[in-house]
Image: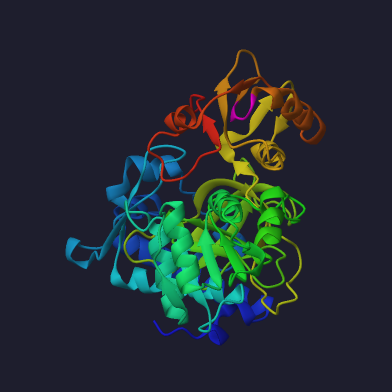
Amino acid sequence: MAFRPEFSWEFLSRDEITARSLRALRNHVKHLKEVSNYYREVLVDINPMDITSIEDFAKLPLTEKKALAEASEQFKAVSEDEISETVVTSGSTGKPVVFYMTSVDLDRLAFNEALSFHAAGVSSQDRAQIIVSLDRLFIAGMAYYRGLTTLGANTMRIGVLDFDMQKHYLELLKPTVLVGVPSFLKKLGERLSQTGFDTQKSSVEKLVCIGESIREESLELNAVGSGLADMFDAKVFSTYGITELSVAFCECVQQRGNHSHPELVYTEIVDEEGNPVPDGTPGELVGTPLGVEGMPLLRYRTGDITFKLPGTCSCGRNSDRIGPILTRKSQKIKLKGTTLYPLTLTNALDEMDCIEDYALLIDGGESQSDQVTLHVVTPPAMVESIAAHLRARARVSIPILVSNVPTINSYRGDSAKKLKIIDKRTPN
């Protein structure tokens, strides 16, 4: 697929985006009924030609994560000889799902990531180091590589190496762009500074941050995001991706929300009952990926809570924009009569330099309140300071246990992600 960003739907008017989306969604439903065993049954009474408005589409059945996990083979829509790549979801919130991708799906994924990096100001003049795992069937590293090469950037598959090798390649290759997990980039910057490496005078101009939030609900940088910006004297960009949709939502150079790519995904935000919520109101992100061959989905409930930003972006794109992920739907915390987003806690904890690592363990308590315990790697003398900071920033008091890195990693299991929230509650 040739990369022509000027042809992206994002630069069309809102009315034209809606009109094109409606036609694409109608064709998508028709295609699902033809190729998907799962949707052939679910949509048996649905005539695609009856979908004459976005409101009609919003009445179609939602696809639950549980259904995908339990019957993933029923979603496969191509023959075995058409499959070019197999990836697996991280399993951070349940059973990992095997996903099959055709060569067309891989081209589509590359196009999506190229659009995302292009929006963030990355170009063929950049030298980009991918400091993300490219093995273990992990879609993200592979997606970033394909997107950057499609964009024409000088792309370097560094991966997750030890500190000495990271420093070696930074000095040898002088990248202008780093793609990585914020907490890892922060530790890398701190280690570099300890060796006398001046991170502020390095070649790095942009940090594309994946897997963890770098923004508050207000869209202002949180402690990790602002710390990275200062540490490298670089612009930091937020991105959100999900394997099931084979898309990423990335900030543009204006950094006022993460843009969707409407030719590749139709985006909705819904309440608990699946009804649309007004722009600016938190709800569950629901996505319908367009143009997927291997395992196409319809109105997939991601389980992630965010919100759409109202209005259009000053960058000229008229695509939907979403804010930071506030929480997983399953991870909202009920604490002493109030509902709390985990992002409130993690942002507060990330502000404290005395914390080397941490994990918030959530368990179902008696009555209507959850039990939350903070396991933290820090000097014991800092526990009261951490407790006071949580009371001030998050207005909560929770038990704090001093731990160590191996113990905290044991809570995370074999997840491909460095989890900060360990949810031990029994699913409903």
Rendered position, 235 above or below 123: above
Q: Main secondary structure of the magenta part?
A: strand
**Residue 161: horizontal and vertical position, in percent?**
40, 54
Residue at image location 54% in from the left, 24% down from the top: 403
Front residue of 406 and 97: 406
Residue at image location 57% in from the left, 86% down from the top: 6
Residue at image location 50% in from the left, 76% down from the top: 127
**Residue 82: horizontal and vertical position, in percent?**
22, 67
Q: State which quadrant residue 221 falls in.
A: bottom right
Residue 419 is inside the magenta segment = no
In this orientation, does residue 297 appear? no
Report the residue that reaches farthest toward the front.
196
Residue at image location 67% in from the left, 26% down from the top: 334
Report the residue that reaches farthest toward the right.
392
Rendered position, 207 above or below 302: below
Q: Quadrant of the N terminus?
A: bottom left
Front residue of 272 and 358: 358
Name the side, left or right, on which 182 lies relative to 34.
right
**Residue 286: horizontal and vertical position, in percent?**
55, 53
Rendered position, 89 above or below 247: above
In this orientation, does residue 333 appear? yes
Picture mark count: 0
Front residue of 193 and 108: 193
How is this picture coloured? rainbow
The boundaries of the magenta stretch are: 375-379
Report the residue that reaches farthest toward the top.
366
**Residue 204: horizontal and vertical position, in percent?**
59, 69
Name the side, left or right, on which 313 lies relative to 25.
right
